[in-house]
Image (cartoon, grey):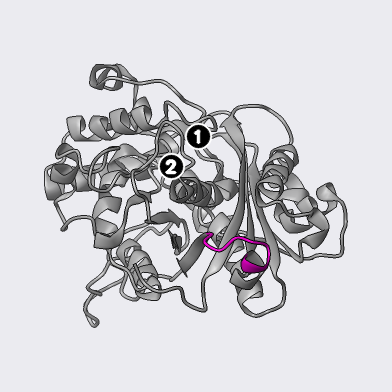
Amino acid sequence: MPEKNDRDIAVLGAGMHPWGKWGRNFVEYGLVAARVALADAGVNQLDIGYIAGADTIRNGYPGFVSGATFAQALGWSGARISSSYAACASGAQAVANARAQILAGLCEVALVVGADTTPKGFFQPVGGERRDDPDWLRFHLLGATNPIYFALYARRRMALHGATLDDFAAVKVKNARHGLNNPNARYRKEVSVEEIAASAIVSDPLRLLDICATSDGGAALVLTSMEYARRHGIADPVRISALSTVTPTFPKTVLDLPDFATDSSVAVEPQARTFRSAIAHAAYEEAGLGPEDLSFAEVYDLSTALELDWYEDIGLCETGGAEQLLRSGATTLGGRVPVNPSGGLACFGEAIPAQAIAQICELTWQLRGQADGRQVENARAGIAVNQGLFGHGSAIIATR
């Protein structure tokens, strides 16, 4: 484990509102999560110098200015604010903003909040007719909903690496078992391979139980400088040791919607690392760690097949080795490097602006030894990764 460095920040508080389909205003979920995080940290709201909100684009104007929305809901205190949208990486961008403020010495204590209320069914494009918007076009011109996008990746994995439907099902079985004892998870029930195979085909080859739901929920973190933590008697807090939000590098030769085509590699050779693997690599370099140092990982399992891709992207195995790693039991609780001990999106569903923050909540509880019923033994370092549309993604490494 590397020595503490001057870019570490402390995670003093973590809080969540349970995921579900509650049908309430997203602000309520964020407030619950924020108050739990503040209580966990033992920090008074008036000590918060910066509030970073992760935006939701499906809840009107308050969702677009979430930093101000949550600041007002908590009670105006004069804190500085920011509001960030980066698709599925929105929460990580909010964390990055707060971290930058702390490391720049502009504040000692920051609150990061993300919450969402989602419509029934899979996500649709935001309303209106926008013929110059690639996201609008991929729905209306290609008919490429999110499940179709996930299925294309699943087919690619089957063609390139020989993945089977049973491999995809095994990911769901594992994550469902992990999430059984997570009080914040929406789905807390074991499932069998037979049940997954019998669930409806949504986008071939993926069944309903292969794809994450859309959910309501909220998550929050209280982040501080290391000096603030020490002054308040916390000598060994969970630390965020690296945060990567790198973008793709030309030429990008693996298709990600809403792009309709890849870049040409006629004149320029493709990069050695794909976009997702580059996100993780940058975090490893910053933290001074490698995949071999991880105790566990939280990855963005929008589908069961995508979890397998992440095994390779974060360096747990060689390209094409994810299926064997899964079959070996290495990624289940009790294995070499458990993946998604929280239960992942398979058990939560997706509340977009809250999801990356929720991943760090899980890193925090695991590293503290507080993940009752799903605890990774001797957890010392964890990584949380996700990818959003339009070249967004993040990798966050937490250590203790």
Magenta span contains residue 199: no
Kindly identify which residue carries mark 1: 122
Q: Tell me the chief SS of the magenta region.
A: loop
Q: Under tag 2, what secondary structure?
A: helix
Residue at 79%, 61% (x, y): give it.
47
Query: Which x, y percent locates residue 265?
Result: 24, 75
Kindly identify which numbered label has been placed on residue 108: none
* Residue carrying label 2: 146
Closer to the N terminus: mark 2 or mark 1? 1
Question: Which residue shows up at 61% across the image and 76% down it?
Answer: 103
Residue 393 is left or right of residue 63, and the answer is left
Rendered location of residue 53, percent (x, y): 68, 56
Disc 1 element = loop
Distance Cα–Cα, label 2 vs label 1? 7 Å
Q: Is residue 236 magenta?
A: yes
What is the span of residues highlighted in magenta in the rendered image? 230-237
| x and y, in percent, of residue 246 in the image | 43, 71
Q: Amino acid at mark 1?
A: Phe
Check disc 1: other Cα within 10 Å, few if <14, some if 14-19, many if 20+. Answer: some
Please rate how many residues cluster around mark 2, counting C-alpha atoms within 10 Å: few if below 14, some from 14 to 19, many from 20: some
Residue 362 location, x and y as percent?
48, 46
Pick whichever, 391 or 66, lies toward us. 66
